[in-house]
Every structure is written in C-alpha cells, then in structure tokens.
Amino acid sequence: ATALSESYFKPQNQKLGLLKALLDIDYWPGAESLFRHLRNCDPASHPPVTRALCAMLARAIQPLYAEISPRVAIAKAGAGESQASPMCMDTDKDKDKDVHQDLKFAANLGQKQVFTAIRVVGLHLSTDIILFAKICRVLKDLLKNHPRYLS
C-alpha cells in the first residue's frame, strides 16, 4: 500500500467517515461522488466502508431476492405451483409491461446504481458471503429469465 492510502485508513479520517455515513443513509449519489474523489486509495477496502456498502447493497437487492429465494421456491414446490421465477412470468396483461418496472430495488437505488455499487465494492464483496450468494442468485435469474439484458 502507498503512504497516501495508509494515511487514509486512520480511524479519524473524516472523508471515510462521511462516506460510511452516506452509505448508511442510502444516499448513493453523494457516496458515488466521494468514491470517485477517493479512487486512488480504494476506500472500499476500509472495513467500516466495506460493511456499510455491503449493507446498502443487501437492502437494495432484497426486493428481487425475496422473489427468487430458495425458501420461496420450496414453498411453491410444496404448493404445486410452477417453479418459474415470478420475475419472468408473462401474462397477457403484463406483456406490454417493461421488465425495468419489475426490477424495483430498495434503498432508493436504480438498476444502474446497484451494478455500479457492485463494481465499486469489487473483491471486498467476499467479506459478506451471504450477500455474494444473493447477488449471484439475482444475477443468474436476470440472465436466465431476461435475456434482453445481455444485449
């Protein structure tokens, strides 16, 4: 690590404290701006920032994960329902509905911001293995059931 990055990780660093606070209140525009400003020292590697970023991501993907979680699949299988993802079920009245409307994220984050936050946390996502698994399941479902996201 460089001397610059080592000095940033002192506990009293106000910039990292502000970044953590912005993530705690789910204010992504401000946090993203601060991430860009601090990009030379990898603020996501600071443990409190990493935890706050992972917590924000967990809140953001919860609505999608709730629809595809293994518990929901088991409950549906037990009830004899189709095992298709609720995100991909098409009915005649829903055909005109844009898939983007189905992808509702919590934490006032849109789809693009969630993907940006995943990119920002990068390798540090491994500190929250449960979140990592949830993100993998959500992305798998999106790629499997919504191929137009690939184009």
Image (cartoon, rainbow, N blue to C red):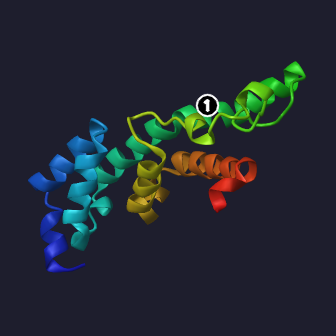
Q: Quadrant of the C terminus?
A: bottom right
In-image side of 10 versus 45 (left or right): left
Q: Secondary structure at mark 1?
A: helix
Name the one closer to the observer, 81 or 102. 102
Name the one closer to the observer, 30 or 4. 30
Q: Residue at x 70, y 49 (%)?
A: 146
In-image side of 150 versus 24 (left or right): right
The picture quadrant where one finds residue 77 is: top right
In-image side of 98 versus 144 (left or right): left
In-image side of 144 versus 142 (left or right): right
Residue 11 visible, this orientation: no
Residue 4 position within the rendered picture, expressed as x and y whole percent measured from the top left: 14, 75
Name the one closer to the observer, 89 or 107. 89
Q: Which residue was labeled with disc 1?
A: 66
Q: Quadrant of the N terminus?
A: bottom left
Label count reads 1
Q: Is residue 28 above or below residue 67?
A: below
Specify the farthest residue to the bottom. Answer: 2
Q: Residue at x 16, y 48 (%)?
A: 17
Specify the farthest residue to the top. Answer: 79
Residue 67 visible, this orientation: yes
Q: Amino acid at mark 1?
A: Ala
The picture quadrant where one finds residue 6 is: bottom left
Q: Residue at x 43, y 61 (%)?
A: 119
Residue 111 position within the rendered picture, expressed as x and y whole percent measured from the top left: 48, 47
Q: Is residue 41 above or below residue 30?
A: below
Specify the farthest residue to the right. Answer: 80
Q: Residue at x 86, y 19 (%)?
A: 79
Residue 58 position within the rendered picture, expressed as x and y whole percent measured from the top left: 47, 40
Task: Give the class, few, some or many, for how many residues have Cα within 10 Å of label 1's Cα (few <14, many ≥20).
Answer: few
